[in-house]
Image (tube, rainbow, N blue to C red):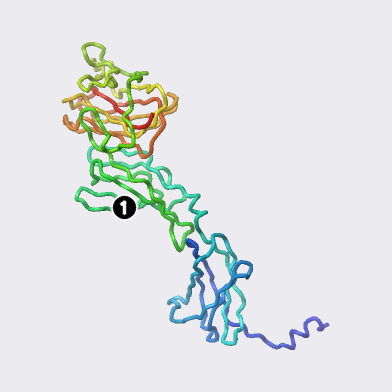
Amino acid sequence: MNDNIKEYLDRGEIAYIGKADSVTTAGGINRIKLLWKINSDPRITSCKILWNDKQDSVSFPIDRGEVDKNGYLSYILEDMPEGTFIFNLYHVGVDNSLSMGSEIEGTVYGDIYKSNLNPRKIRLVETLADKVNLYWEEGGNSSNVLFTYINRTGEKKTINIPASETVTVIDDYVLGGEYSYKTIFLPEENALDQFELDSPVDKFPTYYVGDGSLDDIFPEYLKLDRGTWKIDDFSSEEPTGANGRAAQIIDNDPSTFWHSEWQATTAQLPHSITIDMNTVKGVKCVTIAKRQGNTDLKTAHIEISTDNRSWEIAGKVEFEKTADPNAKTIVLGEIKKARYMKLVITESHRSPSASISEVYVLGTE
């Protein structure tokens, strides 16, 4: 009955070299780190790692001086192709005897992984009296954003924005100043390397007096021709006198203006005016100019739509109770498609009265 095992019994006991314990991997960009716990077996002199169905391997001596205080040792495989691999790790004794193997799966990342990543986007930039709010789209599988700008003291400042943050408040930005950011991706929790995607340089909103020209700040966009635009709807207007009608916010004459109906009992906040731009445009910036020399307007926002049914808030501006600045600009994080634009006035410094001289759009036809 012992015939099947007699051969092995005759060999006697086998004392295996101490096995690698608690093996983990940390994937990186065309490289991977293996981390394992090494015991105190004095016979261990080197290590051997095999992968790719054991067709590829590397051997290296073990320096116990490199073992950390918790008994862990690590080794990085460089110049690895992208993919997921099964690694077999062995300790080797002075007589070239092998320990029992430890098997672990690990992933190496590269261009294929990077090609499927998308940078986080700013949905809109909202300028208020003393700060700017950046509204972010969902963070997806990114870990954070590194946002860089020059603050009011001339210092180059970088802030770390976690993926969970949907609104970033910046109270020391420079009007019209440039900003840039990197979206950071960690392919796994303890990744050896991170991926960075740069977003194009953009500019913070600034204030404009007069016709709201943005040519110098955004030369790549056009100031859209309003010749075919019309007023589609409004909640209130003053029909008497030379000024007051809604159509005067697109008449290209900053000296004329729309005004809510002077009879306060019939013209309560909020006020709204809907503009039909005749065809779908690409909207990047919207400038709202107050009635010249007037301080009534406090808070207004812009909504955009392609069909006059589904609306999206593009941004908000807030004016101090002063005549200047006469105009403020909403800058969208990325260009948005829209045919209809709704101006909504929600607050006034002399409620419920409000007035607007012009609304301009910078974008693409």
| Left-right relation of 192 to 239 | right
Q: Position of residue 169 (x, y in %)?
A: 30, 45
Compare residues 91 and 348 and report the one nearer the observer. Answer: 91
Seen at 21% across and 13% down, the residue is 242
- Drawn side of residue 17 relative to residue 155, left or right: right
Q: Is residue 126 above or below residue 73?
A: above
Where residue 333 appears, x then y in whole percent? 36, 40
User: Label 1: how many residues lie within 10 Å, few (<14), some (14-19) or many (20+)?
Assistant: few
Label 1's element? Answer: strand
Residue 59 at x, y = what percent? 55, 77
Kindly indicate the quadrant of the structure image that contains residue 326. Answer: top left
Going by the numbered disc 1, the residue's amino acid type is Ile
Quadrant of the image for the C terminus? Answer: top left
Q: Quadrant of the N terminus?
A: bottom right
Q: For residue 99, what is the image quadrant?
A: bottom right
- Residue farthest right in this picture: 1
